[in-house]
Image: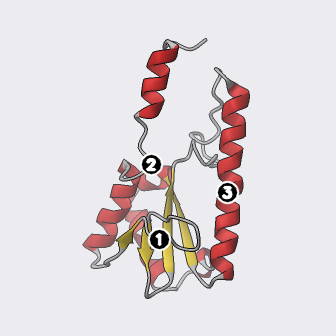
Amino acid sequence: MDVHTRSQRRRNMAAIKHKNTKPELVVRRLLHRQGYRYRLHVNVCGARPDVVFRRRRQIIFVHGCFWHMHECRYGRVQPKTNGAFWKKKREANVKRDDRQLARLAAEGWHALVVWECETRDAAKLQERLVRFLENDDPKDQPAGT
């Protein structure tokens, strides 16, 4: 049973942002501090990555663990109310992500997915971001991995 009324739950869900989230701001601050300059939410091959480096042909997606079904404890949460709806919605997000990454790879873009839970360790995340942008880490390349 949900602890909120339908109208309260609706208001809560409507307030969830899809741009400029806290994890996204953490990533952007780390990048800016390292001297990287980028564009935000630019349409690239039908996708809207959170951070875009056009000349480098590199993009960064910052995914919420719950919404994109990460394998961490936050992504494994299953809503009790209207569970079938949320399962279908979250699985559709994952399928869309896979399609977008495949399309971006085919177009020659390199993508990195940063999970919300990874933003809790700034030093480790900063190292990963720099490695990706300097092309030193083949596991982060190309898009679709």
Instruction: Give the quarter of the image for residue 100.
Output: bottom right
Side (left or right) of 1 relative to 13: right
Q: Earlier in the sequence, mark 2 or mark 3?
A: 2
Whether residue 67 is situated above or below residue 124 in the rendered picture = above
Label 2, label 3: how far apart the Cα atoms are: 15 Å
Label 3: which residue? 96
Residue at the image position 67 percent from the left and 40 percent from the top: 89
Q: Residues within 10 Å of mark 1 (few under 14, many from 20)?
A: some
Q: If the image is split into quadrants, where does the C terminus sit?
A: bottom right
Label 1, label 3: how far apart the Cα atoms are: 24 Å
| Residue 116 in view in this figure | yes
Secondary structure beneath dot 1 equals helix
| Residue 145 in view in this figure | no
Give how far across and how far down residue 19 sits, in percent.
40, 52
Check whether the beta carbons of the residues at disc 1 and disc 3 lie within 8 A of each other: no
Whether residue 48 is situated above or below residue 68 in the rendered picture = below
Residue at the image position 43 percent from the left and 25 percent from the top: 11
- At label 3, the amino acid type is Arg
- At label 1, the amino acid type is Arg
Please tell me the numbered disc located at residue 18.
2
Residue at the image position 68 percent from the left and 52 percent from the top: 94
Label 1: which residue? 128
Give how far across and how far down residue 50 sits, in percent.
44, 63
- At label 2, the amino acid type is His
Secondary structure beneath dot 2 equals loop
Q: Nearer the viewer, residue 122 or 68?
A: 68
Q: Nearer the viewer, residue 119 or 37?
A: 37
Give how far across and how far down residue 21 sits, in percent.
38, 49
Q: Earlier in the sequence, mark 1 or mark 3?
A: 3
